[in-house]
Amino acid sequence: MNATKDKPRNMTDIAEMLGITAQSVSLALRNSPLISQELRDQVQAIAAKTDFKARNYRRRRSGGGNTGKVMVLYEAANVGDPVAQQIMNSVMKRLAEQKMIFETCSCEELYDNPALIEGFAGVIYHYCFRPWFASILEGIAQVAIMHEEIDIGPWDSFKPNEAMAGKLAANYLIDRGFDRAILTWEHSLAYHAETHPRLEGFRRRMREAKAEFVELEYDRADDPQIYLEQLRAAIEAYGGRAGIFAFCDQVAYKVCHALNFAGYSRKPKELEVISCDNTYLIRELDPPVPAVDLHIAEIATRAVDGLLWRIANPGASWQDVMLKPELVVPEGRPRRKVRENASNARPPGCKTEADAVPRM
């Protein structure tokens, strides 16, 4: 939109004007201390200048669309996470397209004041499941986005096929001739790393190919020099030639900068990094890195459609929808996109993309 001529229609428009997320706009409009005072002032100045207010925003959602309100739950600590940002923006965009009344709320706010959920027909959440949801959200339609650690029901689940994502990353390195690899992740980003399906998918495929690999975990609270030395030691142990699978874009970004700092040059078929997520973060890297695209925006959009379907069909069976990841190789290398058949790696009882709830 043209910020100088047009009034913002919703929080996403304000977010685009300032180059931030709609989630941050929501927090700023509520004067949340999670957002800097400077950014709060900027958001509130635009809102005042254009006569945009949260209560008017929600009222505009009520005309001519679906009935019932939707709460979008989020984890306050994930405000800066690129995947969480993409999910939040996509969820809010789709809800706006469907003319739904919706509000955002942090898990902390809901825990402190459970009465906030009163009057809502549905809840959608990502990266923030809590055991106490069962009591507070009882009887309300629920959809979870990208939650591998929770069993299905009483909520519908929309997520990527994580095991396939790991397999695609392993196949890329194997196809490039790497028989030695480094698997690396950050402690707070990969829950239950020993069994995480993305990591397990990589491990399983590498073992099938009889390829050697070492695993490196780091904690952002540790001295960065410790991880740098571990990374350097692993590369040197492999004679300077290795493929590196970074658990996600945040890890890939840190790994690439660590390699630069240590004096290593990333070269095709010699020292390569492959990531997983394919968010804006890795597009800043030079040379670019291949990534397994989880189709995060599509997952979030389908999740919203799934929630509206659940509100209209409260008695239907719970849905566990997996979307297929895709290998994306940047320009300058042989261009290839690979989307495997999700049925090869889905858990028992899982609904595949073909079984997903219909779009609305």
Image (cartoon, rainbow, N blue to C red):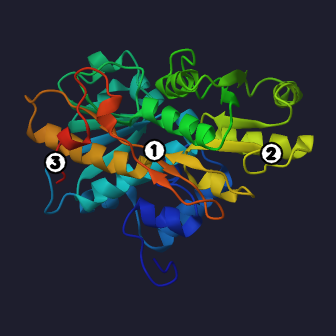
- Amino acid under label 2? His
Position of the N terminus by quadrant? bottom left
Sequence order check, earlier mark of 3 and 1: 1
Asked where in the image residue 316 lies, by quadrant, the reply is top left
Asked where in the image residue 313 lies, by quadrant, the reply is top left
* Residue carrying label 3: 358
Direction from residue 316 to residue 108 in the image, left or right: right
Q: Position of residue 139 (x, y in %)?
A: 17, 24
Direction from residue 82 to residue 235 in the image, left or right: right
In three-dimensional space, the C-alpha distance between marks 1 and 2, rounded to whole angstroms, equals: 23 Å
Asked where in the image residue 111 lies, by quadrant, the reply is top left
Q: Are marks 3 and 2 in contact (CB under 8 Å)?
A: no
Q: Are marks 1 and 2 in contact (CB under 8 Å)?
A: no
Residue shown at 45% from the left, 44% from the top: 294
Position of the C terminus by quadrant? bottom left
* Residue carrying label 2: 257
- Amino acid under label 3? Pro
Q: Position of residue 206 (x, y in %)?
A: 58, 26
In three-dimensional space, the C-alpha distance between marks 3 and 2, rounded to whole angstroms, equals: 42 Å
Direction from residue 210 to residue 135 in the image, left or right: left
Q: Nearer the viewer, residue 89 or 261?
A: 261
Kindly tell me whether residue 249 is visible in this rendering.
no
Residue shown at 26% from the left, 42% from the top: 353
The vertical placement of 271 against 106, above or below, is below
Kindly tell me whether residue 208 is visible in this rendering.
yes
Q: Secondary structure at mark 3?
A: loop
Mark number, residue 294: 1
Structural crowding at the residue carrying mark 2, measured as other residues with C-alpha within 10 Å and reported as few (<14), some (14–19) or many (≥20): some
- Amino acid under label 1? Leu
Residue shown at 62% from the left, 39% from the top: 173
Residue shown at 39% from the left, 53% from the top: 90
